[in-house]
Image: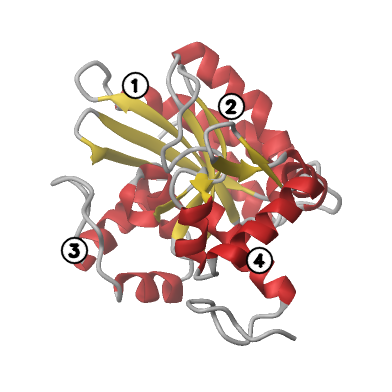
Amino acid sequence: MSAPQPGEPHKLTAAGRVLTLLDVFSRGTGSHTLTEISRQSGLSLTTTHRLVRELVAWGGLEADGTGHYRLGAKMLSLATSSTSGMQLREKALPHLADIHRRTGRTVLLGVRDGAHVMYLEALRPHANYTGQNRIGGRLRLHAGAVGLVLLAYADDGVVDEYVENPLKRYTAHTIGDADELRRTLAEVRENRYAIAPRSLTMAAGSVAAPIVNAEGEVEAAVGMVYLVERDDPQRFVDLVRSTVSRISRSLLQRPGPPSPASVVFLRRESSPD
């Protein structure tokens, strides 16, 4: 086995190098140059070039003609055929498309991935969006309504660990204090939805509610982006809650009987407050 290249992590196997390289595409815009991939992965430029060439030939990466690379169709095919997240997306998509068509607003489907939201779907009024809440993108849990919902229904230990780290402020309205975050999470659990005004940008906010699976656990959340100067977020709360209720009911069609907790939750979501 050859000696590690300068700047390259020690003791990485061949598979480890590939995985380290692919992990770069979970951050930023999802489109990177060879130099960016090398820098963010810690792999030498020579190794990066060789691995990228092999991944392009296999179909795992594709070049866009501007010197940038992004995940290719082979990766999407593997994810779609094997992950529960993609199965959830398939169940949710007709309902997401319906609320998107009715409102013309961005609609998001997200799951918790450690301290981040990972977005499984993002339906937008405009194409070619490459921000953090794109499909496959990640965003800190406290920074938007989808993440607040997912964190509110996580175990206490998850919340305790989360608040041990600094809460990054994206705007002056982003939650940046642990006590404020805990109070907000309690309100989300009580209300069964979250509203996050101007948390990522001063022009927009988001509304979200939880999706419950057949085991009675919050598996994901649906969010909607609203325009602060144009929309009343309360107008979207019932729409989002009715959407997650329909998606949760579709998840009950998975094999096995639903848990009592999921039945209670869905009855509560279906009844007026």
Q: Earlier in the sequence, mark 4 or mark 2?
A: 4
Image quadrant holding the N terminus, namely bottom right
- Residue at which label 4 appears: 19
Q: Nearer the viewer, mark 2 or mark 1?
A: 2
**Residue 93 seen by the camera:** yes
Image quadrant holding the C terminus, namely top left
Tag shown at residue 177: 3
Residue shown at the point (23%, 48%) measured from the top left: 170
The residues tagged by marks 3 and 2 sit, at their Cα atoms, a distance apart of 32 Å
Residue shown at the point (60%, 64%) measured from the top left: 46
Q: Earlier in the sequence, mark 3 or mark 4?
A: 4
- Residue at which label 1 appears: 235
Answer yes or no: do the residues labelled 4 and 2 have beta carbons within 8 Å?
Answer: no
Q: Secondary structure at mark 4?
A: helix
Q: Secondary structure at mark 3?
A: loop
Q: Nearer the viewer, mark 3 or mark 4?
A: 4
The residues tagged by marks 1 and 4 sit, at their Cα atoms, a distance apart of 44 Å
